[in-house]
Image: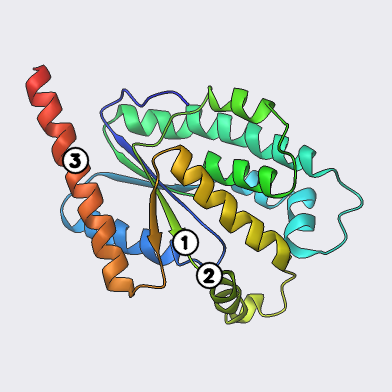
């Protein structure tokens, strides 16, 4: 991915549905607002993809015969290139801190978890998007994640491919290791998990400011 050379910071959160990602983003958002940080909150894929028939089929139904998963992955990749360069990049240029719910890593994890290990196009696409300054991977046992999803009234009957969730968790951990991501376990208390996120962001900001001062 392209290095972020703009004034702003890009921070991404990835993990299984039910990992606690949304809660951590909300707490991080509130903390940063409280300290006066100029923020932009976003998510990937965008609603353009989330509301498409192919996306909803893979999310909500066990029968995927009508679609090739690669076509969904290509659609999501196209959405990410557009979103990164026409939505996120302008915010970074303005010096804002961008928090993204999911990112390129989610697309890659899903593709690999579904067996498309030899596809190289996904790595070529990566050259057109910005590398996060900090990438958090919220890890959780699959059973815990599924239990949390099922506890939501609107998702208690949602179709979940359990085997896929195990493969996805493994791929997220592999991708985090390959890309120097920060793996955090949501088995820990919410407060402990959030404190680790705060410390990581604070240390990165301090290091970035020190580097800027030295460069000046």
User: Crowdedness of circle 3 by 10 Å Cα count: few (<14), some, many (20+)?
Assistant: some
> Do tag 2 and tag 3 residues touch (Cβ < 8 Å)?
no
Q: Mark 1 or mark 3, which is nearer the start of the sequence?
A: 1
User: For the view shown, which residue lies furthest in the right direction?
Assistant: 65
Instruction: State the separation of the CA atoms marked 2 and 1.
Output: 7 Å
Query: Helix, strand or loop at disc 3?
Result: helix
Which residue in the protein does label 1 denote?
A: 139
Which residue in the protein does label 2 denote?
A: 141
101 relative to 125, above or below:
below
Residue 130, image x, y percentages: 44, 29
Please tell me whether mark 3 or mark 1 is closer to you in this view.
1
Q: Give the residue at x 54% y 42%.
A: 105
Quarter of the figure with the C terminus:
top left
Residue 64, image x, y percentages: 86, 55
The quarter of the picture where residue 90 lies is: top left
Which residue in the protein does label 3 denote?
A: 205
User: Is 40 left, or right, of 82 in this rendering?
Assistant: left
User: Crowdedness of circle 2 by 10 Å Cα count: few (<14), some, many (20+)?
Assistant: some
Query: Helix, strand or loop at disc 1?
Result: strand
Q: Mark 3 or mark 2, which is nearer the start of the sequence?
A: 2
75 relative to 90, above or below:
below
Q: Give the residue at x 47% y 34%.
A: 87
């Amino acid at each position: 991915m392209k290095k972020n050379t703009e004034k702003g910071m890009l921070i991404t959160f990835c993990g299984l549905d039910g990992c606690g990602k949304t809660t951590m983003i909300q707490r991080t958002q509130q903390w940063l607002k409280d300290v006066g940080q100029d923020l932009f909150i976003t998510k990937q894929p965008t609603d353009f993809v989330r509301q498409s028939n192919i996306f909803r089929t893979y999310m909500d139904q066990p029968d995927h015969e009508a679609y090739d998963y690669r076509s969904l992955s290509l659609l999501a990749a196209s959405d990410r290139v557009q979103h990164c360069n026409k939505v996120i990049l302008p915010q970074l240029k303005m010096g804002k801190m961008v928090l993204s719910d999911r990112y390129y890593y989610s697309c890659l994890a899903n593709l690999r978890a579904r067996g498309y290990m030899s596809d190289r196009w996904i790595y070529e696409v990566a050259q057109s998007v910005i590398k996060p300054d900090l990438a958090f991977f919220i890890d959780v046992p699959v059973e815990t994640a599924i239990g949390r999803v099922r506890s939501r009234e609107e998702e208690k009957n949602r179709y979940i491919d359990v085997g896929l969730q195990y493969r996805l968790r493994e791929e997220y951990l592999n991708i985090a290791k390959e890309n120097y991501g920060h793996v955090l376990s949501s088995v820990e208390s919410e407060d402990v998990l959030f404190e680790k996120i705060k410390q990581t962001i604070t240390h990165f900001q301090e290091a970035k400011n020190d580097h800027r001062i030295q460069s000046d």
